[in-house]
Image (cartoon, grey):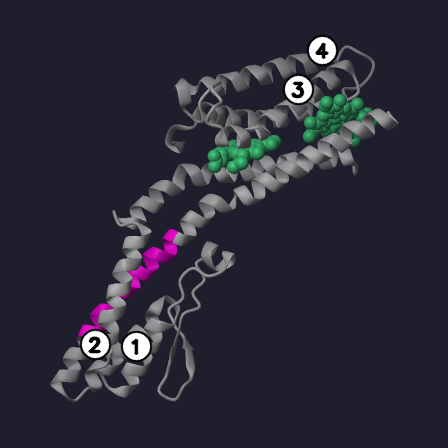
Amino acid sequence: MFDNIMRVRNYRYFWWCMGSIVVAVGVFATQTSSNEPANGGTWQGLVLGVWAALLIVWLTLLGVRKRSYRFRLGTVQDWTSLHVYLGVGVLVVATLHAGLQFGWNVHTLAYVLMFAVIISGVVGLFTYLSYPRRIADNQQGQNRSQLFGELYELNQQGIKTARSCGPEVQTAAISGIQRTAIGGGVLSQLFARDLSRFETLDGVQQPNPHQAPLIDLVSKRIPRADKHDEVTALQDLLVILCRRQAVIERLRKDIRLQGWLQAWLYVHVPLTAATLTAVVVHILVTFIYW
Ligand code: HEM
Ligand code: HEM
């Protein structure tokens, strides 16, 4: 869906947004001849203020449109495309409304919050446009549960093979497989933090980021093994651990990318609520104290 969100109906909504901006600039320009400097209180300022407020309300309604199946006016794709363009366009309308006059007051707070919503929207649009392809490239045709299935198989093989190795490798490999951390809290998911560990023979816990220290331990053990059977078991274990490492990295990347695909909405939506509240307060304050 988001592949062509900017191009919906041959850029129709881009032109709607440009039309809205041209009209807003036209209204704003009629102020220059009057004695009063451009500001939110002239009739032109008020028209632009009402226009900006209506746009913000309409932009907020995308949340309702997305969840409504009975609504027939425009598809969700149309709404989202227009949302993206008008979401940026409202910045121009609100700036012209304020007549470029800002201060440390609730009016400017409304403006700053709106600006933050727009920035988060641009970040979200970027993730929607680029992440689905990156997710598909990373998955290489296997979805997340298939990847977990493959990891489970490799874990079983790894534990079985480790049992044929010496005690040092056995303890490290089995504990390393059991203490592999994938996902976790929000920050761990978004930044792919790796809290994996393994245990040495004397019970000390070692960090095992990207499974590299465990793989290193097993590969260094191979030249020191004296029995042919142990060499074979260590080599098999090494292959399994390297395959596990690749699957784990793909899973971790999948979780990270899918997390970012949703995380920005947890900023975008609460900031929208804060903006609406500040705009209402701004309107009330201007009419009470004006
Ligand atoms: C129904 C909609 C709106 C009305 C009636 C309205 C009304 C006004 C009025 C009367 C002023 C002039 C206040 C003064 O000179 O002291 C003003 C200024 C301003 N408005 Fe609005 N406004 C509306 C919507 C908005 C929106 C949506 C935003 C941005 C999110 C906004 C941001 C501002 C800013 C930044 C100023 C300039 C404050 C300053 O001079 O320090 N307004 N507005
Ligand atoms: C003041 C401006 C804006 C407001 C008030 C606003 C508000 C909202 C709201 C309430 C939603 C629905 C979220 C949900 O319920 O899931 C939404 C979705 C969205 N917004 Fe905005 N937005 C604004 C500006 C922008 C901008 C500038 C962009 C991008 C350039 C943008 C991109 C999006 C996208 C892509 C979605 C769709 C999310 C989805 O379908 O999962 N928004 N916005």
Residue linked to disc 1: 173
Query: Which label sits on residue 51?
Result: 3
Quarter of the figure that contains the N terminus: top left
Q: What's the residue type where badge 1 is placed?
A: Ala
Q: Nearer the viewer, mark 4 or mark 1?
A: 1
Q: Earlier in the sequence, mark 4 or mark 1?
A: 4
Give yes or no for contact between labels 4 and 2 (Cβ–Cβ under 8 Å). Answer: no
- Left or right side of 91 for 142: left
The residues colored magenta run 236-254
Q: Earlier in the sequence, mark 2 or mark 1?
A: 2
| Secondary element type, mark 3 | helix
Measure the alpha-carbon separation of dots 3 and 1.
Answer: 65 Å
Q: What's the residue type where badge 2 is placed?
A: Thr
Q: What's the residue type where badge 3 is placed?
A: Trp
- Left or right side of 108 for 84: left
Q: What's the residue type where badge 4 is placed?
A: Thr
Q: Reply yes or no: does residue 42 show up in magenta.
A: no
Residue linked to disc 2: 161
Which quadrant of the figure shows ligand 1? Answer: top right
Q: Reply yes or no: does residue 249 show up in magenta.
A: yes
